[in-house]
Amino acid sequence: MARKQGSHSGITGPKVRAAALRLFARDGYAAVSMRAIAAEVGVQAGALYLYTPDKQTLLFELMKGHLEELLAAWAAEPKPEGAAARLEAFARFHIRFHLARPEAVFLAYMELRNLAPANFAAIEALRRAYEDELAAILRDGVAEGVFSVPDLRLATMAIIAMLTGVNTWYREGGRLDRAAVEAIYCDMARRMVAC
Amino acid sequence: MARKQGSHSGITGPKVRAAALRLFARDGYAAVSMRAIAAEVGVQAGALYLYTPDKQTLLFELMKGHLEELLAAWAAEPKPEGAAARLEAFARFHIRFHLARPEAVFLAYMELRNLAPANFAAIEALRRAYEDELAAILRDGVAEGVFSVPDLRLATMAIIAMLTGVNTWYREGGRLDRAAVEAIYCDMARRMVAC
DNA sequence: AAAGTAACTGAACGCGCGTTCAGTTCAAGC
DNA sequence: GCTTGAACTGAACGCGCGTTCAGTTACTTT
């Protein structure tokens, strides 16, 4: 049978991941069929199994990849002196990173329940590691005497929930641009923990 | 054929809603079959259609019911004088109400994409009405000179995201009880908008 | 030109899906 | 005790699911 242009190009793997991410984020893991992903890529469903052992692993790899990228990106970020400055860096980084990847963020928050227990544990550990980065900043700030928090863990969760919340309403071309949102949320995060 | 005890008891409707809420929240709308809901109730799948026209409407009614209950409960709450006191009342109410209904809250946040457009619009309007309640408190606080917010809408979204975030980590019997969590989050919300 | 190989097809597997509906059961009203 | 009607069953409808695999294609290596 005639083969279409672009076959054997060697980029099908990334295409599969991109299509799966897009569709999982839009319709939800359970509502997306392997055939739908395949159609998006331009192959038959069977071909997907050259790139993933099964559907569940495809989801897990997407979430794991997202969180590892998040941790790596934060690790690569310059860390200023002083907890107050580091909190600002964290808040700005968090919003910037998350607004740039709305689909992956959505997936990582919404599809946890579709993970097999072992995969769930792995994702939770990555998320916890990220939370610990913020917790360390707050702890340092308290030690420096520039922050006062009633409870370290709760303040951590509160700030992350607040910052991640931006993804639920932010739309390109809205009333405020990313820089303005960054600045305002930065300010609110600072107020929450400032003495 | 012999009929089991409890038939024709006239409470099947509520049972259907309760089972659907439990299963939708646990496994996700798309992953729950009408047969699974029916099994939970103790009837055959066909019997569910005496209580709902279809699966989609069942989801919509659950979400609508939850948000209407939320608005009614807040309307029934005593409103103290002064924006600062009203913010405290709102924060405590929000946490208390949401922690008491984790399944409905989870459903109302996670299954929006499974709503038909008309149903989605109805749910969004209810949610917006609730947000406006908090926005009004913040506006009043600014007018009274007791609050200072860089942006009214963003502060509203930030506080609600922060408060709702409690549901993602709070577990009965954990380190802090509900009252302690309420108090700490109340404090953080106040700090965010205080002058 | 022949052989080898990675990429992909297309058909098939058993299964469960949402929904419909004719028929059955049971309690209540007369 | 007969009739009524609400509650419910159980089978059926066509369809799409995740996954497998023998076979086919297109390109590379020799």
Image (spheres, coloured by chain):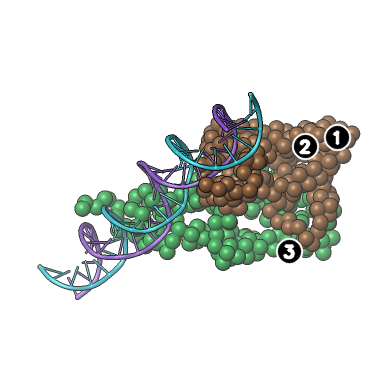
Chain colours: A green, B brown, C cyan, D purple
Residue B34, which numbered label? none
Q: Are marks 1 and 3 on the same chain?
A: no
In front here: D11 or B117?
D11
Residue position for label 1: B79
Q: Are marks 1 and 3 in contact (CB under 8 Å)?
A: no
Q: Secondary structure at mark 1?
A: loop
Residue position for label 3: A136
Chain letter belonging to callout 1 = B
- Name the residue at 81% across, 50% down: B182
Q: Are marks 2 and 1 in contact (CB under 8 Å)?
A: no
Q: Position of residue B103 (x, y in %)?
A: 66, 48
Nearer the observer: mark 2 or 1; the answer is: 2
Chain letter belonging to callout 3 = A
Residue position for label 2: B73
- Name the residue at 34% across, 58% down: A47
Mark 2 or mark 1, earlier in chain:
2
Q: Secondary structure at mark 3?
A: helix
